[in-house]
Image (cartoon, coloured by chain):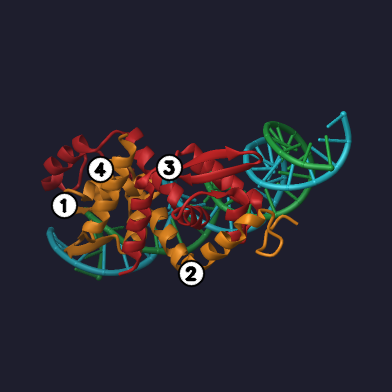
Chain colours: A red, B orange, C green, D cyan
DNA sequence: CTTTCATATGAATAGTTGTTCATATGATTA
DNA sequence: TAATCATATGAACAACTATTCATATGAAAG
């Protein structure tokens, strides 16, 4: 027995507050989506990719060169960024150019940088 | 051979741009710190904890009750949030109250919510 | 001092994730 | 059509992580 319920709650006085909060909590799916979004930013390779795309579009091999990583590793990460719609692609012959999907991504990165530099 | 260098780069025309970007990229440690920060937000349990603390301080067992999880699981996650200075603690007898460390945390969560609702 | 309560933590485990290697796809050029 | 180039992807593996269970700590009450 270690999972508390609203019935056997040990801090009796908090019961009302707890019940209220349980009501205001967004649904599981939404909270899952939010954490999934942040999970994308929680990898230094992906942060680096997003950072270099900050300036403008780049092709896959250019990103690999700048970050000194293999084309495969970069491509795998770009797939994740593409699936979560954080980056956009543009094809030009054999080359595929990647760029940030919108300014939202920029803002989130800036937010992280700001928090770190304190 | 799959790791590109500035020397054997296949997209000759991009060489200059690539070299420039390599220079503007923040140092490894900073980028690691930023991704580490986002990694904290990349777990739904921690997001939920931060969300319920949004309203005000709560003790460990109250958080466990609201989130319908074990005290142990919550305590482990609170340790991570404490170590990364995203939450603060205040002791009152046997009870330990947790609250958000600063408004920065609030802003980041709002950011995530905003991005999701599109 | 013993018991009880709230919280913290170590060890174990199951699930997840990032990179590598090999190979496939899809577009250009010879 | 064959060869080459840029990119994508599947499988495998190593590293990491969140939860559970058992137990420890530390404070209050009896």
Q: Who's the residue at 22% across and 60% down the image?
A: B102
- Crowding at mark 2 (Cα within 10 Å: few <14, some 14-19, many 20+): few
State the separation of the CA atoms marked 1 and 2: 37 Å
Position of residue B53 in the picture relative to residue A67 (left or right): left
User: Mark 2 falls within which chain?
Assistant: B
Give the mark toward the camera: 3 or 2: 3
State the separation of the CA atoms marked 4 and 2: 42 Å
State the separation of the CA atoms marked 3 and 2: 25 Å
SS assignment at label 3? loop
Place of residue B112 in the rendered image (x, y in percent of width and height, measured from the top left)? 32, 45
User: Which of these two is toward me, A51 or A31?
Assistant: A51
User: Is C10 drawn above or below residue A89 in the view shown?
Assistant: below
The disc, 4 or 2, on the residue closer to the chain's N-terminal end is 2
User: Which of these two is toward me, A98 or B108?
Assistant: A98
Place of residue A44 in the rendered image (x, y in percent of width and height, measured from the top left)? 49, 58
The disc, 1 or 2, on the residue closer to the chain's N-terminal end is 2
Give the mark toward the camera: 3 or 4: 3
Q: CB atoms at circles 4 and 2 under 8 Å apart?
A: no
State the separation of the CA atoms marked 3 and 1: 35 Å
Tags 3 and 4 both on a single chain: no
Would you name the residue on which mark 3 appears?
A101
* Figure quadrant of the C terminus of chain B: top left
Place of residue A83 in the rendered image (x, y in percent of width and height, measured from the top left)? 50, 37
Q: CB atoms at circles 1 and 2 under 8 Å apart?
A: no
* Figure quadrant of the N terminus of chain B: bottom right
User: Mark 4 falls within which chain?
Assistant: B
Position of residue A72 in the picture relative to residue C2 (left or right): right
Would you name the residue on which mark 2 appears?
B27
Give the mark toward the camera: 3 or 1: 3
Would you name the residue on which mark 1 appears?
B56
């Amino acid at each position: 027995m270690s999972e508390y319920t609203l019935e056997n709650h040990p801090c009796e006085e908090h019961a009302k507050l707890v019940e209220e909060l349980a009501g205001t909590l967004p649904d599981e799916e939404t909270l899952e989506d939010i954490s999934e979004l942040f999970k994308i930013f929680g990898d230094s390779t992906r942060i680096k990719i997003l950072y270099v795309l900050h300036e403008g579009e780049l092709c896959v091999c250019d990103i690999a060169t700048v970050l000194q990583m293999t084309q495969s590793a970069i491509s795998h990460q770009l797939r994740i960024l593409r699936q979560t719609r954080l980056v956009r692609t543009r094809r030009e012959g054999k080359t595929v150019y990647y760029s940030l999907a919108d300014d939202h991504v920029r803002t989130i990165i800036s937010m992280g940088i700001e928090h770190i530099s304190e």
